[in-house]
Image (tube, rainbow, N blue to C red):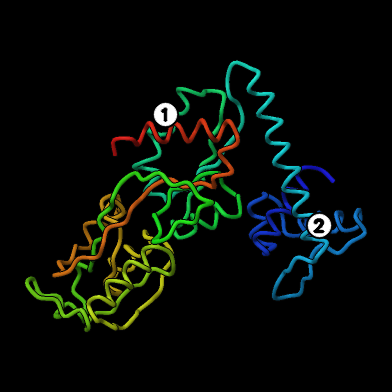
Amino acid sequence: MDFRELKAFVHLSQSLHFSNTATAMHMSPSTLSRTIQRLENELGQSLFDRDNRKVKLTLSGRKLLIFAQNVLQQQQQLKQDFVEKSSHLEGELTLFCTVTAAHIYVPKLLEAFRKQYPAAEIRLETGDVALAFDKINDQSVDFAYAVFPEKLAKRYRFHSIESIPFKLIGPRMNTPFSKHMGKTEINWQKLPFVMPEAGPARERLQDWLTQMNLQPEVYAQVSGHEAIVSMTALGCGVSAIPLPVLEYSPLKDKVKILPASIPPLPLNLGICCLSKRLQSPLNKAFWEVVQNVYQDE
């Protein structure tokens, strides 16, 4: 067994999803399946119980997981120990963020980090902020721009960047429900809603609906803030999004911010990682740059 096989095994042990792990490891599902089979043949043990619906670690699999995590951590530490003996840090780390965050927050962070550590590389991965903590947990990324949850487990480190307004939006075009969106009064119960599929935006909007004692029609559940703006602009319904998403959207002129007597609470945006990942000198250096760049935010 080699390090790449162990990394694939560890990721699959945490995701329990062949397709997701294959994508994260940049290999095909069939290649991943053969990798796991080689490990099982080498050890003479079944590592996963799997059928068409689910994947589950066996007892032998759980034992190998502990071994693999220790080996990979020692490998990373050894690599960093060698790097520390040189005059600069090298290596690669992965940063997860939304497309909007990549435009607004990432550039000055990368500029500061590259200026201080030119030999280090940062791989940027974009996606829905709802996936941020999942990405951190399965260790497919080192750091992620995320929204501070109501309760933050002790295994995480979180550095706040900015409190972001969470705005209710509606279409500018004429729709069958436009008559319920008056300039001074809005009949929210009569409006169809485009709901975020998951994550902090859904939780924040659902909390607002509960606070307003509303149970409106849900037109659709959509993944990603940019898709929510698109569906709202097309007249599918009303919704709520972080203000920067609207400001940077090419469809911003096709939607409007809706006034509310009780506005939704803002979102606390920051950068998150697993505390144990900061044992790596490269990750620790990046975290220090994060704290310096965003200290006055």
Which disc, if any, is residue 272?
Answer: none
Label 1 amino acid? Glu
Name the residue nearer the viewer: 68 or 186: 68
Label 2 amino acid? Ile
Measured as percent of width and height from the top left, residue 250 is found at: 30, 53
* In this rendering, position of residue 65 left or right of residue 187: right
Residue assigned mark 2: 36
Name the residue nearer the viewer: 233 or 219: 219
What residue sits 85% from the left and 46% below the top?
A: 1
Measured as percent of width and height from the top left, residue 111 is found at: 41, 29
What residue sits 59% from the left and 15% below the top?
A: 87
Q: Quadrant of residue 278?
A: top right
Spot the residue most to the top: 87
Name the residue nearer the viewer: 45 or 2: 45
- Secondary structure under tag 2 reads helix
Measured as percent of width and height from the top left, residue 190 is found at: 22, 84
Spot the residue most to the front: 154
- Secondary structure under tag 1 reads helix
What residue sits 31% from the left and 69% below the top?
A: 205
Residue assigned mark 1: 111
Measured as percent of width and height from the top left, residue 51 is found at: 76, 74
